[in-house]
C-alpha cells in the first residue's frame, strides 16, 4: 500500500510537470476551451512539419493569469498563453513576457491600431491580438431607420420614443463604469494620461476634468429626463431590448446571440459621440520559455494567418483584430461593421496594475450622480481622491 501511495505521488508529480513546466523541444500552450481545439489542430500541423510536439492544456480563461504568474516566477509554466490585454502591464513589468518582434510593418498594418496599442507596454508589443470587445449602439430597425450620430440626436430620438413602458434607449449604467466610459471619455475625460513615450501615467487621472464631468452630466440627463429608469443595470437593459421594449441599446458584441435568438431585427452603429474602452484578447509568449524561436515560429506562421484567425472568430465571434478577417466575417455577419466602425474612436482598457484601484471609486461616483445624491463634479472629485490614495499605498 505504501509503495502504491509513493507511486501515485510520483505519477501526479510527472503529470503536473507536463502541465506546468515547459520542456526544451516541445511547445506548451495554455488556452481556454474555445481556443484549445483550434490550437491542438495547429499543433498537429506544426509537429508534422517541424517534428516539434505541441501540447495544449485547457483551463479556465480566468485561471490562466494567476497560474501563469505562479509558474513563471518559478521558471516554469507554458511557452504561450491565451490572455487579455489588461494582463500585460503586470506581466511585462515583472519581466514575464517576451516582446513580439516577428511582425513586419505591413503585417502590423493588418491589425486595428487599438488592438496593438492595447497589447503594448513601455513602447513594446507583448501580444498577438485576435479578438476585440467594444461597446456599440444596437438599434431595432422596426423603430429606428437611421441611427443617431451625435449625442444630441441620441438624446432627442430616445426621448421622443420613450412612453408608456417603452424606452428609446436601454443603457446599463448602474454598477459598472465600463458602460459609462464611452460618454465620460467621449466628452474629454480619461482614466490615465500618457507619458511622452506613450506609456500610461497613473499620476495623471482625468476622471474629474471638465470633459469627464460633462460626460457624466449627459448620462445624468438621460435619467432625469426619464429616458432611463433609476437602477437600470446591464441585465435590465438587455432584457428591455430583447423583449422589444426598447428601441436602442448600448452593449457589446457578446449580446448578439441573445438578440438574434429573440428575433429582433437589429443593426449596430458606433455610440454617438462615445469613446468606449476596447478589451483585446491575444497570444503572449513567456519570457521563461526555453523555446523562444519555436514559439515565435508557431505564432507567426500558424496562428497569425487569415484562416486561423477566421476559425477563432467562428468559435467566438468577437470583433476580429485583423481587418482582412473582419471583412470576411462581415459577409456572414453584417452587424460586425458597426462595431468595426466603432473602433475608430476608442481607448484601450488600461493595462497597468494601478487600474485595479479605479473601479470601485468610479462606480460609486457614477451611482451617486445618476441617483441625484451628489453632483457629477463632486462625485468624480471624490473618486479621483480615493483612486490617488489607493494608488499611493
Image (cartoon, rainbow, N blue to C red):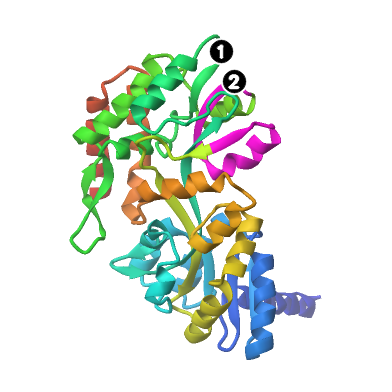
Mark 2, residue position? 245
Foreground: 188 or 119?
188
- Residue at (79, 77) in percent of width and height: 4
Q: Considering only vertical position in the picture, is 205 above or below 327?
A: above
Q: Is residue 30 magenta?
A: no
Q: Is residue 259 magenta?
A: yes
User: First in sequence: mark 2 or mark 1?
Assistant: 1
State if disc 1 and disc 2 touch (CB < 8 Å).
yes
Whole-number angstrom distance, CA of label 2 to CA of label 1:
7 Å
Mark 1, residue position? 165
The percent position of residue 74, horizontal first and vertical second, equals 47, 75
Quarter of image, res 380: top left
Quarter of image, res 266: top right
75 to the left or right of 124: right
Foreground: 340 or 125?
340
- Label of residue 96 in the image: none
For the record, the magenta segment spans 244-267
Residues packed near mark 1 inside 10 Å, few (<14), some (14 to 19) or many (20 plus): few
Task: Classify mark 1: helix, strand or loop.
Answer: loop
Amino acid at each position: 500500500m505504501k509503495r502504491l501511495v509513493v507511486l501515485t505521488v510520483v505519477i501526479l508529480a510527472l503529470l503536473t510537470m507536463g502541465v506546468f513546466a515547459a520542456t526544451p523541444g516541445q511547445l506548451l500552450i495554455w488556452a481556454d476551451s474555445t481556443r484549445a481545439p483550434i490550437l491542438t489542430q495547429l499543433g498537429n500541423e506544426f509537429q508534422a512539419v517541424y517534428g516539434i510536439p505541441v501540447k495544449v492544456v485547457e483551463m479556465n480563461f480566468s485561471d490562466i493569469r494567476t497560474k501563469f504568474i505562479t509558474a513563471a516566477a518559478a521558471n516554469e509554466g507554458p511557452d504561450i498563453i491565451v490572455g487579455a490585454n489588461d494582463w500585460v502591464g503586470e506581466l511585462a513589468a515583472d519581466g514575464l513576457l517576451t516582446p513580439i518582434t516577428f511582425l513586419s510593418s505591413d503585417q502590423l498594418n493588418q491589425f486595428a491600431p487599438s488592438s496593438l496599442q492595447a497589447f503594448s507596454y513601455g513602447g513594446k508589443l507583448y501580444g498577438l491580438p485576435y479578438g476585440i470587445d467594444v461597446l456599440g449602439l444596437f438599434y431595432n430597425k422596426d423603430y429606428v431607420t437611421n441611427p443617431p450620430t451625435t449625442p444630441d440626436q441620441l438624446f432627442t430620438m430616445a426621448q421622443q420614443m420613450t412612453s408608456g413602458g417603452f424606452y428609446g434607449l436601454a443603457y446599463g449604467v448602474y454598477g459598472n463604469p465600463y458602460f459609462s466610459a464611452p460618454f465620460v471619455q467621449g466628452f474629454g475625460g480619461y482614466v490615465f494620461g500618457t507619458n511622452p513615450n506613450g506609456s500610461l501615467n497613473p499620476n495623471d487621472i482625468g476622471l474629474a476634468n471638465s470633459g469627464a464631468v460633462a460626460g457624466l452630466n449627459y448620462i445624468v440627463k438621460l435619467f432625469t429626463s426619464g429616458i432611463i429608469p433609476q437602477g437600470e443595470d446591464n441585465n435590465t437593459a438587455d432584457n428591455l431590448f430583447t423583449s422589444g421594449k426598447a428601441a436602442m441599446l448600448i452593449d457589446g458584441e457578446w449580446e448578439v446571440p441573445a438578440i438574434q435568438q429573440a428575433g429582433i431585427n437589429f443593426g449596430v452603429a458606433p455610440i454617438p459621440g462615445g469613446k468606449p474602452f476596447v478589451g483585446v484578447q491575444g497570444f503572449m509568449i513567456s519570457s521563461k520559455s526555453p523555446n523562444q524561436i519555436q514559439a515565435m515560429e508557431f505564432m507567426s506562421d500558424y496562428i497569425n494567418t487569415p484562416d486561423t484567425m477566421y476559425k477563432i472568430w467562428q468559435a467566438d465571434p468577437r470583433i476580429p483584430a485583423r481587418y482582412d478577417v473582419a471583412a470576411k466575417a462581415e459577409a456572414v455577419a453584417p452587424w460586425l461593421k458597426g462595431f468595426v466602425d466603432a473602433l475608430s474612436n476608442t481607448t484601450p482598457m488600461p493595462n497597468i496594475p494601478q487600474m485595479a484601484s479605479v473601479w470601485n471609486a468610479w462606480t460609486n461616483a457614477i451611482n451617486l450622480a445618476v441617483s441625484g445624491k451628489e453632483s457629477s463634479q463632486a462625485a468624480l472629485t471624490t473618486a479621483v481622491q480615493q483612486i490617488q490614495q489607493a494608488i499611493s499605498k
